[in-house]
Amino acid sequence: MSRVTIIGATGRLGSFASHAISGIPYVDEVLLSGRPGREQSLTALSHDLTDSCAARGSGTRITWSTDADDYADSDVIVVTSGVPRKEGQDRTDLALENARIIAPIARDIGKYAPEAIVLMITNPVDVMTAVALRYSGLEPRQVFGLGTHLDSMRLKALIASHFHVHVSEVHTRIIGEHGESMVPLWSATTIGGIRVTNLPAFAGIPVTNMVNRVKNSGSFIIKNSGATIYGPGDAIGTLVQTILGNENRILTVSSYIKSEVHNIGDVCIGVPARINRNGVFPVAIRIEESEIAAFQSSVEKIRGITQDVLEKMDMLRSSG
Ligand SMILES: NC(=O)c1ccc[n+]([C@@H]2O[C@H](COP(=O)([O-])OP(=O)(O)OC[C@H]3O[C@@H](n4cnc5c(N)ncnc54)[C@H](O)[C@@H]3O)[C@@H](O)[C@H]2O)c1
Ligand SMILES: O=C(O)C[C@H](O)C(=O)O
């Protein structure tokens, strides 16, 4: 029996992620959680998703609640609550506003669901992962963020399209910030098991254009269709399935690292991590010199914003 709770379920991403999760075979119950005042919307969404399950021949139960104590007994909690960026904003512009939304939610998770594995989605996701870790009091293995998994999938799609190969033939990773300072690891990119840098055709690929397209993907979609929904929603589904299926896949997610990448750490940021029913375990890696420098600078950026937000949150708390 597995129960997955989505906090922020009435939002654009939350509702599609709920749909994606309801299709995972290991999931018996999806609990749609929202703020008081959202009862009608939660009821309607639960009816719609129940119809969807029936149409797919799935026996997954869809329930809803506005009470935090119903987080209890959740195996996985996905948090999509928070403000999305508007056209022209950077994800990091949302840091303090969303930290103020995430902190009380994380406290409730720590109180009512201390055994759960928590997947953070709210942006800026690396910073919100650190906020959730701090305020929930859970262990680092239990709290992680979507991080650069979505960016890695975006790059994978571009590489597959460029080389006219199936996406399953491409393995690639982007580490670091889910944002401007992300670091594509060409050293860890393979097509059909062959390192891409060993393929003569790689010399002709528009690397900079591809990386810029990944960096700008979210803002392009937001500008032209309002929100990113299906890419992140299905990426959330993959992560939930990886946890509940105890699959031990290595995916690139925002996780607390001490020193796993060339002794760089003390931050929540996108890194390759093994994911299973017990949570998320960053994998120690060695990368190329230029990649180390870029990762170090991404870490410093995210560590700085995280410290700043946590300090401001402390000040807000002490001033009542
Ligand atoms: N990490 C990623 O790759 C990724 C991808 C897409 C969206 N996001 C982030 O997910 C978040 C939600 O995006 P969306 O497009 O679904 O937004 P949305 O506006 O459609 O939904 C926001 C949700 O948050 C809830 N919410 C808003 N303010 C709240 C508050 N003060 N307290 C409690 N709940 C509150 C709303 O009720 C709603 O359920 C944003 O921060 C967005 O940037 C992250
Ligand atoms: O770009 C955004 O603000 C949403 C999300 O982080 C994304 O990359 O799709």
Image (tube, helix red, strand yellow):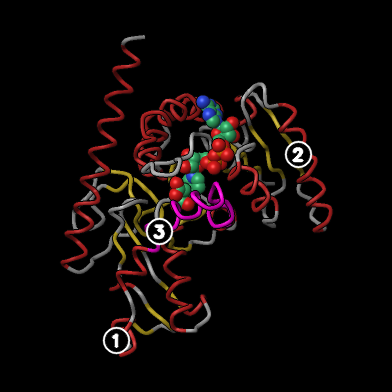
What is the spatial separation of the Cα atoms under label 3 and label 1, in whole angstroms?
23 Å
* In magenta stretch: residue 150: no
Name the residue carrying label 2: 46
Q: Is residue 113 left or right of residue 23?
A: left
> Label for residue 252?
3
Under tag 1, what secondary structure?
helix
Residue 171: image location, x then y, percent: 42, 73
Q: Give the class, few, some or many, for how many residues have Cα within 10 Å of label 3's Cα (few <14, many ≥20).
A: many
What is the spatial separation of the Cα atoms under label 1 and label 2, in whole angstroms?
50 Å
Task: Identify the residue at the far bottom of this view.
Answer: 200
Of label 3 and label 1, which has the lower sequence position?
A: 1
Residue 232: image location, x then y, percent: 53, 53
For the residues carrying marks 3 and 2, which lies nearer the camera in this image? 2
Of 221 and 39, which appears nearest the observer? 221
What is the spatial separation of the Cα atoms under label 3 and label 2, in whole angstroms?
31 Å
Residue 310: image location, x then y, percent: 30, 28
Under tag 3, what secondary structure?
strand
Of 219 and 196, which appears nearest the observer? 219
Q: Amino acid at mark 3?
A: Thr
Magenta residues (range): 213-234
